[in-house]
Image: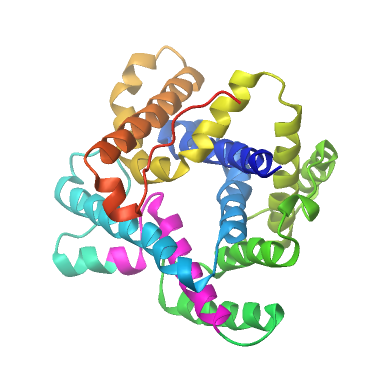
Amino acid sequence: MLDKRIHDYDFVKGILITLMVIFHLTLTSQSFLIVKEWVYVFHMSGFLVLSGFFFNDDKSKFLKTFTAILWPYLLFNTLYMVALSIMQNYLPTNNRVEPGVLSILSYVACKPSGTYWYLHTMALCMLGTFAASRLRCNLFNRVIIASTLLFVVSLFVEGFSFIHVIYFMIGYIIRKSANDMRSIIYPSLLSVLPIVLITIFSDSLARTSLSGIALTLFMLSFLLAIYNHTRIASIRSTIVWIGRNSIAIVLFSPIFTIATKLFAPIFAFDTTQILWSVVSTIFVILSTMICARICDKIKLSALIMHRSMYVPYTQL
């Protein structure tokens, strides 16, 4: 049962992280702007719910878990900021960083760029939730204290949004209350009905709205059900494999997302940008896997994450 549950969640993570890669591709997001805006409502929000669910606030495990998020963030985001500050006039990216040590440090501390905002948010949410969990009070009061603390932090840290705290707390509350997300967010293909209705009739569909929260939760339900109805083993195994390597994709994808713009002219004949998007997505995901394996080989993964970064493919 445990293995199946892990496969379920990794499958959902695999779909969500693939959507992240697809719509971080500049040409794709420009060509499919409406779809991008819809996906942005739930893809990383769903990730945050899962992150809150899997967060372990046990004192004996917290430091190892926390540093496995913090050190990769500090290392990779700092390198990314340095590269942007030095080469931003030559790199095909919209992100801009003022040169200088203080400027780079301020961006790393308060204004993460690219996919690294997720690790930044995770580190702060974990720290605030752990601090509140040390208090001798019930779950409801711990959540209130942690949320209040993190709300105050969000007032001073530009790159930290309180709505992301809400998503994280939803997952955390589910874990503490039920221990199995599927008993609260039940896997159901019928969830497609509220998904369609919310998408069509919501006046303000955004990650920050109540309709956005509802869409995220129904999408998690729907994707969990999709796993149960995916009969082709190779497809199911591949998506689970991608989900298990999501941390590597978060860390390395900004590099290769920029690189995809270099071979865009090759696909100029395809005005829909679909072929370029498919090739670019595969290129980014496979390249991040290779980088993860290299980090394992040179022991960088063990140094900053206390474990291997790359998870091998297995047939389910």
Report whether residue 98 is seen: yes
Residue sitting at 33 percent across and 37 percent down? 292
Quadrant, the C terminus? top right
The x, y position of residue 178, in whole percent, is 75, 61
Question: In the picture shown, does residue 119 fall above or below 155?
Answer: above
Whether residue 92 is visible, yes or no, is: no
Residue 37, image x, y percentages: 59, 45
- The residue at 24%/54% (across/down) is 81
Image point (67%, 62%), residue name: 175
In the rendered image, the quadrant that contains the N terminus is top right
Report the residue at 60% width, 39% height from top. Answer: 34
**Nearer to us in this view, 236 or 56:** 56
Given residues 227 and 200, the one toward you in this image is 227
Q: Is 44 left, or right, of 312 in this rendering?
A: right
Check if residue 231 falls in the magenta segment.
no
Question: Does residue 144 appear left or right of residue 284 in this picture?
Answer: right
Residue bounds of the magenta highlight: 107-134
Magenta: main secondary structure equals helix
Image quadrant assignment for residue 294? top left
Residue 127 part of the magenta segment:
yes
Q: Quadrant of residue 56?
A: bottom right
Residue 211 drawn at (x, y percent): 74, 56
> Hey, which residue is sitting farthest bottom in the picture?
136
Q: In the drawing, does residue 46 fall left or right of residue 128?
A: right
Residue 27 percent location from the top left of the image: 43, 31
Q: Is residue 315 above or below residue 169?
A: above
For the view shown, which residue lies furthest in the top direction?
A: 269
Specify whether 242 is left or right of 117. right
